[in-house]
Amino acid sequence: MAGSRGDRVSELSDEALLSGMAVGDDTAAVTFVRRYQRRVYGLAVSMLGDAQAAEDVAQEALVRAWRHAQVFDSRRGSAATWVLAITRNLAIDAMRVRRSTPMDPARFLALGSVSMDESPEEAAEALDANPDIRAALAGLPPEQRRALVLAVVYGLTAADVSERESIPLGTAKTRIRAGLQKLRKTLDVKVNRP
Amino acid sequence: MSMNPRDPHCEKVQDDLAELALGTLTGRERSVVLSHVQGCADCRDEVDRLSAAADAILTLAPEVEPLAGFETRLFERMGVARPRRWHLARRHGRRVALAGSALAGALALGLGLTLALGGNSIPPAVPAIAANLTADHHIRGEVYLTPGKPGWLFMVVDHTNTNGLVTCRIATAHDGTITVGTFSLVSGSGSWAYALPIPADQVRKAWVVTGAGTVLASANLAR
């Protein structure tokens, strides 16, 4: 039965869907889009704060994932981080073109239930999805958390962070580096070099 | 710290590795750090780890329902028919290859760091293979092979009179036969994907075999 094929495809892993997309299978593409469109759009609208601009970015990100599915390499990370990294880069480009001011990092974190003001213990208790990542982020000192989100999510340079936070450039660099290193150690990130 | 503490060059660039990983380092600082990282495996690994940690933060973004009509507009752009029924994208024995520029473009998007580090990690433009599954000169579906580690086999079976469990077998370049999976056909149709136990370019043929041992259809995958 035709419909049952879709049901089965919808149960395939991300890697299998990308494999199908790489060879032009429409069903795999539709399933992948339906699986990720809310996350991709959610990241774009979190970064841009504008529904139409977020749609433009989300659409372009998913189109590029479709066109370039063949180069996805599961050894370098998950399909989720791959498509979200594409979205981030496009959103940063859009922000630069629009010269829009990045949203407050607290808003991104609040959307994800990690507060800028909570203690690590309080924040960790509020965690639900992505508990390891949320806990790792919640465990950072608030000033490192802010600098890291401004740099990672909004693509600000250390100089931008320095200006925005009214801190010396060296301090901004240290906060970004220290925050990212702590996160990397907490998450025990390994490198799988092809 | 994983970098070599005795190497003064590592010490000099370590403050900037995080920004390089985030893609926010610019100008002369970027070229100085890049030229060091290209020749230093320890720093390259550190940048990769920091980049992976940064990507993890992105997964905290909330799920938000897009505007009405998002899907329709997107599928129009992609040239993908939004299926009321699940049609197959027929690819009659074609080979699919992405040009080097497309590979580079995609890597620049999702894995910008790879290019920035000198491009050693850019995978070769190895084509995927697609072939029809046939029986008695009738098309019964398709098989796709994509390279990688692991490579993947993606199989679609349609228009058969068989229901229930079937087995997929492959023939290798070394004259071996491997059973890669058993799955169900419902109303004569089914689709599956497998991580291959051998490199994709060593697969020569694929069969779908019924529970009674009859070959339902086969595909020639020799390049």
Image: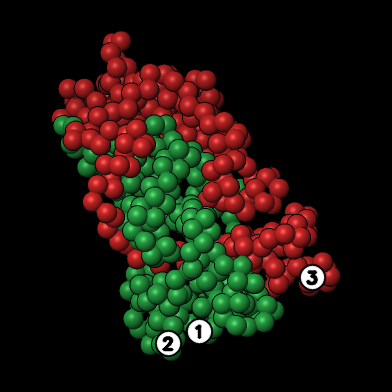
**Residue under disc 3 on the same chain as residue under disc 2:** no
Residue placed under numbered mark 2 in the picture: A117
> Residue A153 location, x and y as percent?
49, 66
In depth, the one of B84 and A6 nearer the eye is B84
Q: Residues within 10 Å of mark 3 (few under 14, many from 20)?
A: few
The disc, 1 or 2, on the residue closer to the chain's N-terminal end is 2
Q: What residue type is labelled 1?
A: Pro
The answer for which chain carries disc 1 is: A
Please name which of the two marks, 3 or 2, marks the residue nearer to the observer.
2
**Which chain gets the red colouring?**
B
Q: Residues within 10 Å of mark 2 (few under 14, many from 20)?
A: few
Q: What residue type is labelled 2?
A: Asp
In depth, the one of B202 and A173 nearer the eye is A173
Disc 1 and disc 2 in contact, CB within 8 angstroms: yes
The answer for which chain carries disc 2 is: A
Residue placed under numbered mark 1 in the picture: A142
Q: What element carries label 2?
A: loop
Q: Which colour scheme is used?
A: by chain
